[in-house]
Amino acid sequence: MIAKCKAIAHGSNALEYVFREGKLGRILALHNLCGETPKEIHEEMRLINNYNSRCKNKFLRIEIGIAPQDEPRMTFKALNRLALLFAKQMELDDHQWVAVTHKDTDNLHIHIIANRISLGRQVYDTTFVSNRAARVAEELSRKYGLTIAKKVATARPHRKAQANPARERTKQQVRSICYALLEKHKGKGLSGHSMFLYELYRSGVEIDRLKNKQGKVYGLKFTYDGQSFKASEIGREFGYHTLPKQFESGNVQKPIIPSSHSSMRSTNDSTPIAQVAVSTVDTALDTAGSLLSEVGEVTTLQTHGVDYAEIAWQRRLRNQAGKKKKRRRWI
C-alpha cells in the first residue's frame, strides 16, 4: 500500500471529481457528515472552515493505492476498516472527511477528502504531510500483511513505459528536416515562413495547431510517418510563439545548432504570430497562395501551422478600429 496527501483550496472540485460518474466505485465512509452528495458534503464542510478566514488551503486530498496482489483480500468491510484506521492515524478524528473507492483504472485506490479545519476550529498541520501519509501507509501495511510501498512501486503494471526506439528515430528524422529547412529560410520574413511551411509539408511533415476549450491556440503538433510530436520535443525554435521570430531579419546571422536537450526545454516568450511585421503579411499571403495553387493545395497551408488568412483578417479589423478612433476625434 502507498499513500500521499496534499492541502488544497478547491474542495468543491475535488469532491466533484471523486464522486464523478464512471469513476466512483463505492462510498466507504462519511465521518462527521450527514450529506451524501458532493454539494451537500461541501456545504457542511464550508460551514466549519468559514470560521477560519486566514487559512487558504482548507481541504486535504489523500490518495491510497492498493497493490494488485492485495486486491483479492480487499472486501468492502476491509476497505472500510482501512480508511477508518488510516484517518485515525492521520489524526483526523475531529475533522470531517469522506472516503470512496475508484473503479476507473486497473488498480484499486481510495480517495479521502477531508476538511482541514477541525470541529474545534483548529487548522490541521500539513508540515511534511505527504511523508506522514506514506509512513502511516507503511505502518498499516506491515501490521496487516499488505504489500509495502517499495514493493508496490516495483510491481505496478501501469508504470510509464520506456521510450519507444522507433518513435525516437522518427523524432530525430523530423528534427533533421525541420532544422534543415529552418536554416534555409531563416531571417527571410513571412515569405520565408511561407516557404518553410510549404517545403515542410512537401517533405511529409504536417503541422497542426493545438487549441484549448476556448478555441485559443496554445501550441503546435508535428506529425510524420504516423507519429505525432509536440513542438517542444522537436526544438525550442519551433514553438507557436517562437517559430515566427526565426524568420525576422535580425535572425539571419544566427546559426541554428540543434541541441540534444532542446526537446525538453520550453520558452516564456509571449510574442504572438500576428505581431510579425505587418508590412510583410501581404507578401507572405501572395507567396504561399501562389505556391500552393500551382500544385492544387490552396487550403493546405491554412491547416498546418499559421493561418495567414486569419492574420490578414485580424489586420483589417485593427485598421477598421483605427479609422473609427480617428473619426471620433474629428467629431
Image: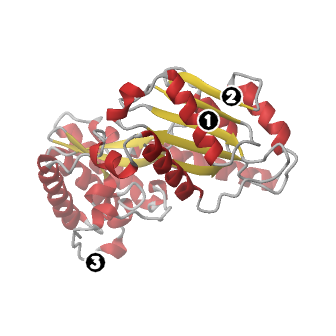
- The residue under label 3 is which amino acid type? Lys
Residue at horizontal 43 percent and vertical 58 percent from the top: 241
As helix, strand or loop, the secondary structure at mark 2 comes to strand
Closer mark to the observer between disc 3 and disc 1: 1
Q: Residues within 10 Å of mark 2 (few under 14, many from 20)?
A: some
* Disc 1 and disc 2 in contact, CB within 8 angstroms: no
Q: Percent x, y for residue 119?
A: 83, 42
As helix, strand or loop, the secondary structure at mark 3 comes to loop
Q: Percent x, y for residue 258?
A: 22, 69
Q: Which residue is mark 2?
A: 30
Closer mark to the observer between disc 2 and disc 3: 2
* Disc 2 and disc 3 in contact, CB within 8 angstroms: no
Q: What mark, if any, has residue 254 been given in the picture?
A: 3
- The residue under label 2 is which amino acid type? Leu
As helix, strand or loop, the secondary structure at mark 1 comes to helix
On screen, 40 above or below 198? Answer: above
In the image, farthest residue toward the bottom: 253
Q: Is residue 14 left or right of residue 267?
A: right
Question: Earlier along the polypeptide chain: callout 2 or callout 3?
Answer: 2
Closer mark to the observer between disc 1 and disc 2: 1
CA separation in Å, label 2 and label 3: 63 Å
- The residue under label 1 is which amino acid type? Leu
Residue nearer the viewer, 172 or 42: 42
Q: Picture quarter containing residue 179?
A: bottom left
Q: Is residue 1 left or right of residue 122?
A: left
Q: Residues within 10 Å of mark 3 (few under 14, many from 20)?
A: few
Q: What mark, if any, has residue 84 been given in the picture?
A: 1
Q: Is residue 313 left or right of residue 177?
A: right
CA separation in Å, label 1 and label 2: 10 Å
Residue nearer the viewer, 205 or 172: 172
